[in-house]
């Protein structure tokens, strides 16, 4: 073997930057980004060095990890001109997969330009499958082909195709999830910001922890019901939710009044009460149903806040999620937040919120033929 491999160090940044400029004409990482990846990011930056007295950088592979999930992303792979044709791409890919396995990842995903035939052949030869195409992805407006490989082999199950909609405000995760679920069940629907905001207005608790209020499960259930969907509701805790995070007694009283009105409307509705036991996600999939689940975002972002996600499927090993929150400070893009594999153990932990272990879900089964 003509190369040695190790994790990158801050002293490698200048050489990494030179290699980046040699290999790519656009969408380049800069020195600041490389330093972040080496010192602070939830990532592994693997460098390949020529053997011999003159140790030179031959290539690198950068793998990003998604906290709280079993998903890794091969963000970039680069090889110097004088190292091509020696199997380095294959070796770096194997290194990336090994580091992802050590990080307990089950899936590795990547993006590649449609005109990069050599890279596409490399990935396909190593078992990666094309599962998506994103138009206007690169700086020059070229599309990106998305490939995926399950690197930790287990039995697989069905994941349904669900459109993705990122929340546009810090407090609109619930409405964003509802838009995705309604679109999946009624493909003729559109997903527009005006409806995201309208759902928030209908479902908000007015106040929650600080700033604008998020949406309660009762409010989201009613919003879905008004739009012609058959709805199931799970709330394991009685009374108003999230009061512990609000200091003002006046605001707490407003939240209680909002909750009482939601409860009054629900008592006269056809919403199915689902009880407090964990949802049978496989059974819901068989029913062609989709579940919005309230989680604690701590396991994903280290922020102890209630957050809505949409379950898109499950198998023996994982629950798959659409997370509407694209947090760019965590090196995430919209495509990183789709079909996120989360172990059943992790999901069970994150779907019990707060000291009272609140379990809350809104399930959409199907919609009426006529949109409301």
Image (cartoon, rainbow, N blue to C red):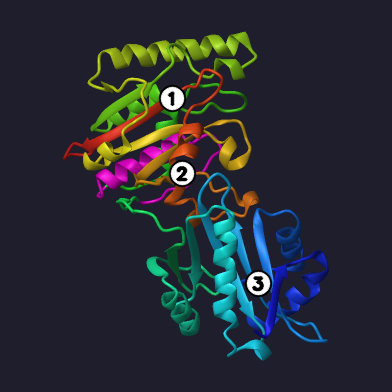
Give the Cα separation between the discs numbered 1 and 2.
Answer: 18 Å
What x and y, as percent, mark residue 364?
A: 28, 34
Q: Which residue is mark 1?
A: 359
What x and y, as percent, mark residue 31?
A: 76, 67
**10 Å crowding of disc 1: few (<14), some (14-19), many (20+):** many
Q: Nearer the viewer, residue 242 or 195?
A: 242
Q: Residue at x 40, y 50 (%)?
A: 164
Q: Nearer the viewer, residue 115 or 12?
A: 12
Q: Is residue 149 left or right of residue 288?
A: right
Q: Residue furthest left?
A: 369
Q: Which residue is mark 2?
A: 343
Checking the image for residue 59, the label placed there is: none
Q: Is residue 326 above or below residue 144?
A: above
Label 3 SS: loop
Disc with the residue nearer the chain's start (3 vs 1): 3
Disc with the residue nearer the chain's start (2 vs 3): 3
Q: Is residue 370 above or below residue 94?
A: above
Checking the image for residue 28, the label placed there is: 3
Label 1 SS: loop
- Numbered marks: total: 3
Give the foreground label among 3 and 1: 1
Q: Which residues are magenta?
A: 163-188
Q: Is residue 55 left or right of residue 264?
A: right
Give the foreground label among 1 and 2: 2
What x and y, as percent, mark residue 100?
A: 56, 59
Give the foreground label among 2 and 3: 2
């Amino acid at each position: 073997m003509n190369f040695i491999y190790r994790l990158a160090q801050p002293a490698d940044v200048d050489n990494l930057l030179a290699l980046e400029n040699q290999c790519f004409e656009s969408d380049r990482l800069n020195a600041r980004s490389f330093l972040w990846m080496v010192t602070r990011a939830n990532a592994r930056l693997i460098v390949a060095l020529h053997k011999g007295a003159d140790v030179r950088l031959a290539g690198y592979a950068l793998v990003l990890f998604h906290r709280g999930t079993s998903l890794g992303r091969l963000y970039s792979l680069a090889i110097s001109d004088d190292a091509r044709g020696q199997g380095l791409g294959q070796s770096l890919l194997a290194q990336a997969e090994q580091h992802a396995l050590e990080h307990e990842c089950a899936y590795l995903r990547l993006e590649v330009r449609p005109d990069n035939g050599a890279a596409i052949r490399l990935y396909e030869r190593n078992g990666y499958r094309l599962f998506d195409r994103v138009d206007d992805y690169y700086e020059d407006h070229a599309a990106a082909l998305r490939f995926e490989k399950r690197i930790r082999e287990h039995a697989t199950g069905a994941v349904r195709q669900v459109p993705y909609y990122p929340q546009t405000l810090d407090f609109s995760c619930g409405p964003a999830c509802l838009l995705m679920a309604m679109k999946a069940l009624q493909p003729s629907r559109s997903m527009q910001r005006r409806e995201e905001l309208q759902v928030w207005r209908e479902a908000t608790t007015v106040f929650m922890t600080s700033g604008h209020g998020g949406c309660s499960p009762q409010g989201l259930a009613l919003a879905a019901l008004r739009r012609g969907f058959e709805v199931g509701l799970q709330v394991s805790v009685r009374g108003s939710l999230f009061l512990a995070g609000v200091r003002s007694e006046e605001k707490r009283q407003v939240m209680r009044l909002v909750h009482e009105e939601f409860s009054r409307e629900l008592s006269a509705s056809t919403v199915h009460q689902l009880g407090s036991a964990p949802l049978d996600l496989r059974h819901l999939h068989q029913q062609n149903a989709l579940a919005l689940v309230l989680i604690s975002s701590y396991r994903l972002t280290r922020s102890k806040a209630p957050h809505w996600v949409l379950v898109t499927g499950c198998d023996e090993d994982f629950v798959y999620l659409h997370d509407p929150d694209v947090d760019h400070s965590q090196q995430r893009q919209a495509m990183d937040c789709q079909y996120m594999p989360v172990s059943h153990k992790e999901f069970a932990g994150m779907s019990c919120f707060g000291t009272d272990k609140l379990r809350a879900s809104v399930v959409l089964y199907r919609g009426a033929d006529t949109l409301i």
